[in-house]
Amino acid sequence: MQAEGGLSGRELTLARDIARYWIARAGAKITSATVTASAGKEPDHNVGDACMSGRLLNIRLLGDFPHTVVSPPFGSTEDLTVRSMQITADAKTGRACLVGVGIKILTPEADAVALPVD
C-alpha cells in the first residue's frame, strides 16, 4: 500500500530512521528533511554496501551541520559552511550506501515528502 508520494508506510519509516541516525551523527540542526523514492540500483557506495534491491530512498537534509567540514582548495576564500546532506539508501534493507554534503543553499524538492525527524 502506498502512503505519500508513492512511498509505502514502511519506506517512510525507514527514511525517517535513516535521517534521524545521520542527523544525530552529524550533530545537525535540521530545517527540512525530505525523501523521494526512485527505481534503480546504486552500485557505488561510500558507507555500508551497494544499494541493489532496485528501489532507492533519496533523503535530503537541510540545515546547520556545525561538526561537518569540507576542505577548501588552496587559496580559496569561498564559504564552505555545510548546509545540506544527501543520503541514498536501499528501500529494502534500509541501509545507506551514499552520503554526501553540500555547501550551497538548497530548497526541498517539489515532489518530496516531508520527514518528521523531531
Image (spheres, helix red, strand yellow):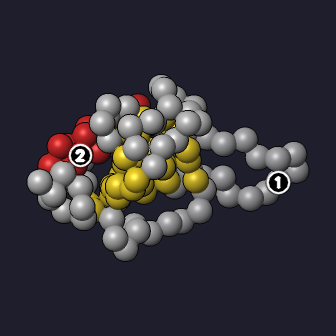
Q: Quadrant of residue 63?
A: bottom left
Mark number, residue 11: 2
Q: Is residue 16 left or right of residue 23?
A: left
> Residue drawn 47% across and 25% down?
48
Q: Quadrant of residue 112?
A: bottom left
Element under disc 1:
loop
Q: Is residue 64 visible?
A: no
Name the residue furthest right. 75
Expressed as whole percent of the image width and height from the top left, the position of residue 103 reads 60, 56
Q: Is residue 1 visible?
A: yes
**Position above or below: 91 against 39:** above
Q: Is residue 20 left or right of residue 98?
A: left
> Residue drawn 40% across and 44% down?
54
Expressed as whole percent of the image width and height from the top left, the position of residue 17 reads 26, 38
Mark number, residue 107: none
> Residue drawn 18% across and 51% down?
8
Expressed as whole percent of the image width and height from the top left, the position of residue 21 reads 33, 34
Kind of residue indicated by mark 1? Ser
Mark number, residue 76: 1
Of residues 5 and 17, which is closer to you in this image? 5
